[in-house]
Amino acid sequence: MNWKPIAGGREHFNLAVKGQWSKLTDAQIEALAGNRMALIGRIRSVYGISQEQAEKQVASWVKRAATTASAP
């Protein structure tokens, strides 16, 4: 999955992350700086889930975002 379109625009990324994982604070999201592994780690920490679960959530989110971005 291509991460670049997701992390490409920082403001868009921050809003999209906040929309998906509302427990993350603005400061936590800003500190991610578009880094996929940092996002996975933060989701694990805040939501108390496994690495595998967090990776699946992020992969699903990226897939939906890519589908939405390519829709006419």
Image (cartoon, rainbow, N blue to C red):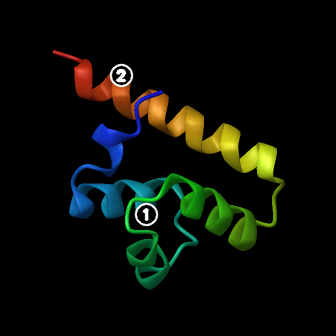
Q: Amino acid at mark 1?
A: Lys
Residue occupying the point 41% across, 39% down: 3
- In the displayed orientation, state which residue is furthest to the top: 72
Residue occupying the point 64% across, 42% down: 57
Q: Position of residue 26 (x, y in %)?
A: 41, 79
- In the displayed orientation, state which residue is furthest to the left: 72
Residue occupying the point 59% across, 56% down: 37
Crowding near the residue tagged with mark 1, few <14, some 14–19, many ≥20 C-alpha atoms within 10 Å: some
**What's the mark number on residue 49?**
none
Sequence-wise, the earlier of marks 1 and 2 is 1
Q: Is residue 23 above or below residue 72?
A: below
**What's the mark number on residue 18?**
1
Give the quarter of the image for residue 42: bottom right
Q: Quadrant of the C terminus?
A: top left
Q: Is residue 24 left or right of residue 47?
A: left
Q: Amino acid at mark 2?
A: Thr
Q: Which residue is identified by label 2?
A: 67
Q: Position of residue 62 (x, y in %)?
A: 46, 36
SS assignment at label 2 = helix
Q: Position of residue 2 (x, y in %)?
A: 40, 30
Is the C-beta separation of discs 1 and 2 under 8 Å?
no
Q: Is residue 41 above or below residue 1?
A: below
Q: Position of residue 22 (x, y in %)?
A: 52, 66
Residue occupying the point 23% across, 63% down: 11
Q: Is residue 66 above or below residue 41?
A: above
Distance of label 1 from label 2 (alpha carbons): 19 Å
SS assignment at label 1 = helix
